[in-house]
Image (cartoon, rainbow, N blue to C red):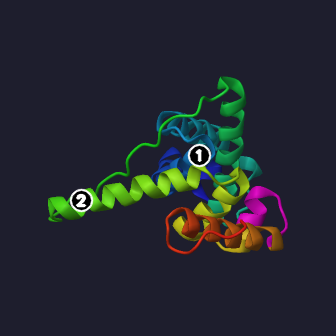
Amino acid sequence: MAAQKGDREAFGELVRRYGPAARRVARAVLHHPEDADDAAQDGFFSAWRNINRYDPGRQFGPWILRIVVNAAHDLRRRRQIRETDPVSAHLPGGEASPVALVEQGELGERIDRALQTLPERQRLAVVLFDAEGFSHGEISQMLGIPEGTVRSDVFHARRALRARLGLEPRGDS
């Protein structure tokens, strides 16, 4: 891997590729966009400093996102993060109608609020699996928990989200 040989441009490409996912994962931990950006940046700095520890035989995504999760936890401990109101979803550009944009933004806000009610591990598991597309095994490595626990967390998180979004009757979560 070129980044391990000190190639800053190669590492910059990794930051561009994994930066959005890193921010989303950090936000799942922190609930605050600015703090999530800080945690993602801290995670990338830590990864750059420790790039020699990366095993090129493994996928880079789970490795960097585990570092970002740790950085988010560290930041939360350092700042003793306060709970904040959810931030509305980023609306995509393009030719969508204003009504569609408003509806999409409202749905994003509802999803944000519902995600924030989940226990942290469930929230991380469902964001990493459904939003980021990582496998149960990769998430297991990132979070340091058994794969079966990841499967259970995703299942329970989805069930709770459906209930909180009014997509199915509330049951015992």
Image-based side of 58 in relation to 149, left or right:
left
Is residue 141 one of those drawn in magenta? yes
What kind of secondary structure does the magenta stretch mostly adopt? helix
Vertical comparison of 137 with 55: above or below: below
Distance from Cα at disc 1 to Cα at disc 2: 25 Å
Give how far across and how far down residue 144 sits, in percent.
82, 58
Is residue 121 one of those drawn in magenta? no
Give how far across and how far down residue 97 sits, in percent.
15, 64
Contact, mark 1 vs mark 2 (Cβ under 8 Å): no
Which of 167/51 is in front? Answer: 167
Picture quarter containing residue 27?
top right
Query: Residue sitting at 52 percent across and 38 percent down?
Result: 32
Q: Earlier in the sequence, mark 1 or mark 2?
A: 1
Q: Which residue is the extreme one toward the top?
A: 79
Instruction: Point out the stretch of residues depicted in magenta.
Output: 139-147
Q: Amino acid at mark 1?
A: Ala
Which of 171/144 is in front? Answer: 171
Give the quadrant of the N terminus: bottom right
- The image's mark for residue 101 is 2
Image-based side of 141 in relation to 162, left or right:
right
Vertical comparison of 9 with 93: above or below: above
Which of 90/56 is in front? Answer: 90
Give the quadrant of the C terminus: bottom right
Q: Residues within 10 Å of mark 1 (few under 14, many from 20)?
A: many
The answer to whether residue 9 is visible is yes
Give how far across and how far down residue 129 sits, in percent.
61, 69
Query: Residue sitting at 18 percent across and 61 percent down?
Result: 99
Give how far across and how far down residue 59 sits, in percent.
67, 66
What residue is disc 1 on? 26
Query: Residue sitting at 63 percent across and 65 percent down?
Result: 160
Q: Amino acid at mark 2?
A: Leu
